[in-house]
Every structure is written in structure tokens, then in C-alpha cells.
């Protein structure tokens, strides 16, 4: 089974307006509300791929109940830990070709709730093959919380795939316990090595540095320009087909789902890279976030090119 973690989930609310007027009433007819959070996007794609998947994190209040009900309706096992606080809303207003977002910070997790989560997490590891950790931490948890989860997972031989950014990713990389895979994008990779921008040569040089030496897989996604990937001492370049992207939000999460499913299925390096990136392309072609059309897997996969990079 694959366990996906979303420690700071949300109910994602989308309002579609022709025009957003300030300081007056805006009435909205086109509204969608879904269980949101990067790890839940991962879980949805894994479920569509036919993988056995469970989702965990922290849920509280009526919004937490809404997410639990959505998971049940989809058929994803709910292993979320209940909390006293209220799960957050994240609002996106789509207007005039723009997207204005209003994001709540979310609940504060108590020490007791954090300890309960860690206890439950370790109990689940006996039946888990892979863990994916995605997104931000809620308030109340220390920046080394992801490192703690990896430290707990390693004695069980459970591979951890991490998709986090900023200080949270840096803190985890500097800890003694390393994830099996990380998936920084271009901007996050530049931030990791202290630059504002980064080119392909600099990415490859960084991947050869000691910072990433103990991490088996580093997948640097470059949007429509594909990806640069390191597996142990081998570096690959992947190019993607040109597609009409309808909604690229969640494509990074879909890539994580693809890699998780591919690792679970024992794919070779090139097959795994191809499969993981295929999920990102498929997500971008769907209006909903964290959704793919499985019937198009072969079509997209056949158009992705993966090659080894000769670095010396």
C-alpha cells in the first residue's frame, strides 16, 4: 500500500467570475469545492492508477468532515488524525484570465495531536510499502517534523518520497535521515543552492554535489521543458510533448504519484521517469486538479523522450 501524507489539507473552493468587482457584492454561480492539498492530489491520481492507497494528516471540524466524506466517496482509505482545530479553506477566484487566491493558514496542532500522529504513523508502516509527503506543515509542528517521519520509516525499509520546498526541504536535506526521492522544481532547486535562477548545466552540477549524494532519486521538474533527474550516479534528461495545458495546477503532485506507482511496480529507470512525467502531462490536460485520463497514458508516454546525460 502507498500512504500519502497531507499534514495541512484544505477544502479548495473555486469561484469563477467574468469580472471581480471590489467593494461591492459579487454573486457566483459557478462554484466547486473539493478536498484539497498536495498529498490528496497524489492520492487521487494513485487511486485512478489502480494502486492501493491511503491518506493521512490532520483533520478537524466540519471542513475536516467534508474531506473525510470525499475520501470515502472516492474509495481512498482515510487514516487522518482528528484534531480540535478547524481544517482550513483555500479560495481561488478565477476572473478575467487571472487567479486571485485567499489562503487560510490553518489550525495549530497541539503537542498531544502531533505525538498521536507519530504513533499512528509508525503503526501503519507495517503494511505500507511507500510513503509520499507533500506540501506545508501546519502551525505547531517543528521544521524537522518531516525528518522525524523519515527517521521512523527507515528501520521498516519504507521508501519516502518528499515534495516540499524552502526551509522545510533544506531542513530535511540537512538531517541524518534522508528521503528516497525529492521533487524540487526549477525555482526550488535554485533556492536550494542559493541562486535566484538556474540553468540546466547548473542543475546538473548541483545534482553531483554532496547535498544530494545520499538521496537515490532527485527529480527536478522544469514545467513544459521536461525534467533533469538523478538516480544514484546517473543523470537523465527528459523532454515532454507540447500539449494544450488546461490546468497545470497539481501536475507536480501527479508526477509524485507516477513515481510512487512506478517504484511500487518495479519499473526500470527509464520506464519510471517516463511513467512519472506522463502523469504530470495528463493532469495538465484536465480541468480538475489531481486527475488524469488513464486511457491516454500510452499516447502521452510514447511522446516522452528520456536520455542519459554524458556529464564528463
Image (cartoon, grey):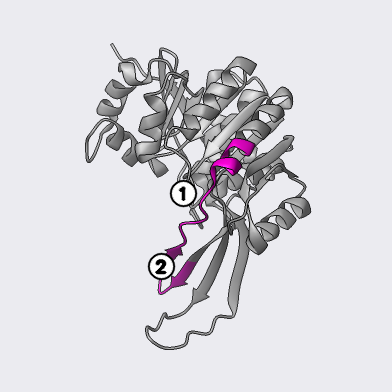
* Residue closest to the eye, 6 or 95: 6
Is 61 located above or below residue 58 in the figure?
below
Q: Tag 1's secondary structure?
A: loop
Q: Tag 2's secondary structure?
A: strand
99 in the magenta segment: yes
Is 130 located above or below residue 15 in the figure?
above
* Residue closest to the eye, 227 or 109: 109
267 in the magenta segment: no
Q: Position of residue 266 (x, y in %)?
A: 65, 19
Is 295 located above or below residue 132 in the figure?
below
Rendered image quadrant of residue 222: top left
* Residue closest to the eye, 173 or 60: 60
Q: Which residues are magenta?
A: 92-116
Of labels 2 and 1, the one closer to you: 1
- For mark 2, does the 10 Å Cα neighbourhood hold few (<14), some (14 to 19), or many (20 or more) residues? few
Q: Position of residue 139 (x, y in %)?
A: 46, 49
The answer to whether one can see residue 145 in this image is yes
Q: Is residue 218 left or right of residue 5?
A: left
Q: Which residue does the image show at 52% across and 73% down from the upper left?
A: 16
Q: Which residue does the image show at 39% across and 84% down from the upper left?
A: 21
Residue farthest to the front?
112
Q: Which label belongs to residue 139?
A: 1
Q: Position of residue 250 (x, y in %)?
A: 52, 49
Q: Is residue 68 left or right of residue 258?
A: right
Q: Which residue does the image show at 71% across and 42% down from the upper left?
A: 79
Q: Which residue does the image show at 63% across and 27% down from the upper left?
A: 130
- For mark 1, does the 10 Å Cα neighbourhood hold few (<14), some (14 to 19), or many (20 or more) residues? some
**Residue that numbered label 2 is attached to:** 100
Amino acid at each position: 500500500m502507498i500512504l500519502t501524507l497531507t499534514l495541512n489539507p484544505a477544502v479548495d473552493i473555486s469561484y469563477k467570475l467574468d469580472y471581480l468587482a471590489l467593494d461591492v457584492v459579487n454573486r457566483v454561480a459557478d462554484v466547486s469545492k473539493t478536498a484539497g492539498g498536495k498529498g490528496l492530489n497524489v492520492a487521487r491520481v494513485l487511486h485512478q492508477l489502480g494502486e492501493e492507497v491511503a491518506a493521512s494528516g490532520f483533520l478537524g471540524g466540519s471542513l475536516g468532515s467534508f474531506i473525510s466524506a470525499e475520501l470515502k466517496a472516492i474509495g481512498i482509505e482515510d487514516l487522518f488524525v482528528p484534531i480540535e482545530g478547524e481544517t482550513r479553506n483555500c479560495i481561488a477566484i478565477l476572473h478575467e484570465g487571472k487567479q486571485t487566491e485567499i489562503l487560510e493558514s490553518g489550525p495549530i496542532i497541539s503537542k498531544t495531536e502531533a505525538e498521536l500522529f507519530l504513533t499512528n504513523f509508525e503503526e501503519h508502516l507495517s503494511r505500507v510499502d511507500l510513503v509520499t509527503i507533500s506540501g506545508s506543515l501546519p502551525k505547531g509542528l517543528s521544521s524537522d517534523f518531516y525528518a522525524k517521519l523519515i527517521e521512523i520509516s527507515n528501520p521498516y525499509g519504507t521508501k519516502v518520497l518528499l515534495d516540499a520546498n524552502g526551509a522545510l526541504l533544506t531542513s530535511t536535506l540537512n538531517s541524518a535521515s534522508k528521503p528516497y526521492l525529492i521533487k524540487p522544481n526549477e525555482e526550488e532547486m535554485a533556492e536550494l543552492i542559493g541562486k535566484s535562477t538556474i540553468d540546466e548545466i547548473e542543475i546538473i552540477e548541483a545534482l553531483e554535489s554532496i547535498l544530494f549524494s545520499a538521496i537515490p532519486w532527485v527529480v527536478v521538474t522544469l514545467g513544459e521543458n521536461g525534467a533533469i533527474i538523478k538516480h544514484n550516479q546517473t543523470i537523465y534528461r527528459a523532454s515532454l510533448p507540447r500539449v494544450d495545458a488546461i490546468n497545470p495546477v497539481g501536475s507536480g503532485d501527479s508526477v509524485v504519484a507516477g513515481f510512487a506507482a512506478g517504484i511500487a511496480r518495479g519499473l526500470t529507470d527509464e520506464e519510471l521517469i517516463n511513467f512519472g512525467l506522463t502523469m504530470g502531462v495528463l493532469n495538465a490536460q484536465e480541468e480538475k486538479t489531481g486527475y488524469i485520463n488513464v486511457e491516454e497514458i500510452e499516447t502521452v508516454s510514447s511522446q516522452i523522450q528520456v536520455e542519459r546525460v554524458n556529464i564528463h
